[in-house]
Image (cartoon, helix red, strand yellow):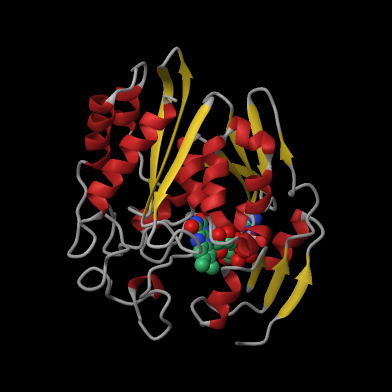
């Protein structure tokens, strides 16, 4: 591991100044330290500890919007009785992440900005597209964990469980960019990963996620995932659904899937189709068809299509209560 300096930032401005050039933010360090040890990202000269930034470790409730600071840990989300009541899907997503030890230090900002888990990307001697090479090794070989939808030859999917749930809840990340606060919904936060093989998300160097705002319009939310292991593993496919449910009818429903595309996969036509509907098996199944239309399975990840279909149906039926 290359030697680096370490500094603790006490304000967002100083964090940005310190990170400018060859610095990198470190929060819980779960992802970043592994990337550095394996030489998977350019070694920074300076690690900027952002855990002391004031005000970013709070969960704030509101009538119309809740705010979750970027330094709130996944464990704090998991243990919050208020979140369990207002955004049960978010609590369930947090509970599925890694292990209690990791959840206790992993932050919301770091979870959203975590890098690809593609095993070719994570193998330092493989010069894959995500590292600037010419080839996506997964495309024609071991692609069982990879995307069904992709905008480029790179088929590495987004794996942040929080991103999937935030997408269904129509949450917005507030990002400090060039000294100004920029708002990005989850589609925008990952869009660049869909079009640029090198990108893991749409953040520019120095961009700092400050918080995530979640509207309270959807009183019910659900998160389900299928994984190889019950714990300490990423999802093969994850599905989050959220809606206002009154008298059994859905309003402003949204469904998002993780681990099948470089962005949380959402289909607006399916959300519109579900709006105002009372859910039954046939309706949930029709929505799942719409959401998965256009999926392009590869040699080893075809199982994700029926798995995603089942998760969407189950999540929607669970949503109605
Ligand atoms: C065995 C295992 C299983 C896992 N399973 C899951 C899973 O099922 N679902 C899931 O979502 N995750 C899973 N994870 C990943 C884990 O949740 C993430 O590594 C963790 O959330 C990263 O958060 P952190 O605070 O430690 O980030 P760090 O490692 O500190 O940072 C990660 C990246 O984000 C950047 N960063 C950090 N904070 C900010 C910020 N505020 N603004 C901008 N950039 C920032 C850093 O520079 C770095 O590039 C798993 C991890 C392990 C080891």
277 left or right of 49?
A: left
Quadrant placement of the N terminus: bottom right
Q: Which x, y percent locates residue 157?
A: 37, 58
Q: Which x, y percent locates residue 285?
A: 24, 32
* Vertical order, 283 against 73 (above or below): above
User: Which of the 4 image quadrants contains residue 107?
Assistant: bottom right
User: Which of the 4 image quadrants contains residue 271?
Assistant: top left
Q: Furthest residue to the top?
A: 247
* Vertical order, 157 against 245 (above or below): below
Q: Which x, y percent locates residue 315?
A: 39, 36
99 left or right of 146?
A: right
Count the numbered circles shown: 0
Residue nearer the viewer, 133 or 316: 316
Residue at 38% over, 73% down: 119
Q: Which x, y percent locates residue 317?
A: 36, 30
Residue at 70% over, 31% down: 61
Q: Quadrant of ligand 1?
A: bottom right
Residue 177 seen in render: no
* Vertical order, 307 against 312 (above or below): below
96 left or right of 263?
A: right
Q: Furthest residue to the front?
A: 230
Residue at 35% over, 36% down: 314
Residue nearer the viewer, 315 or 6: 315
Residue at 45% over, 12% down: 247
Residue 299 seen in render: yes
Quadrant placement of the C terminus: top left
């Amino acid at each position: 591991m290359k030697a680096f300096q370490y500094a603790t930032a006490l304000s967002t401005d100083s964090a940005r100044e310190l990170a400018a050039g060859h610095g990198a933010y470190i929060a819980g360090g779960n992802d970043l330290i592994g990337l550095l040890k394996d030489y998977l990202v350019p070694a920074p000269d300076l690690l900027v500890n952002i855990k002391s930034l004031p005000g970013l470790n709070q969960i704030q409730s509101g009538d119309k919007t809740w705010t979750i600071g970027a330094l709130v840990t996944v464990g704090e989300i998991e243990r919050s009785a208020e979140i369990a009541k207002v955004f049960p899907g978010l609590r369930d997503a947090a509970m599925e992440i890694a292990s209690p030890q990791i959840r206790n230090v992993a932050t919301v900002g770091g979870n959203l900005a975590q890098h690809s888990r593609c095993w070719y990307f994570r193998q330092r001697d493989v010069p894959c597209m995500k590292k600037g090479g010419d080839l996506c090794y997964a495309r024609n070989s071991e692609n069982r964990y990879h995307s069904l939808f992709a905008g480029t030859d790179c088929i590495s999917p987004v794996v942040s469980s929080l991103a999937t749930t935030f997408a269904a809840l129509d949450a917005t990340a507030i990002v400090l960019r060039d000294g100004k606060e920029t708002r990005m919904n989850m589609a925008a936060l990952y869009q660049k990963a869909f079009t640029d093989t090198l990108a893991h998300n749409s953040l520019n160097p120095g961009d700092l996620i400050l918080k995530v705002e979640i509207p309270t319009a959807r009183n019910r939310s659900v998160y389900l995932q299928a994984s190889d292991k019950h714990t300490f593993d990423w999802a093969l496919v994850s599905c989050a659904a959220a809606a206002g449910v009154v008298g059994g009818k859905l309003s402003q429903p949204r469904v998002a899937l993780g681990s099948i595309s470089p962005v949380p996969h959402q289909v607006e036509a399916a959300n519109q189709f579900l709006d105002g509907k009372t859910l039954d098996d046939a309706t949930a199944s029709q929505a799942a068809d719409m959401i998965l239309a256009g999926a392009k399975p590869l040699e080893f990840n075809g199982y994700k299509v029926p798995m995603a279909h089942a998760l969407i149906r189950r999540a929607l039926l669970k949503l109605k209560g």
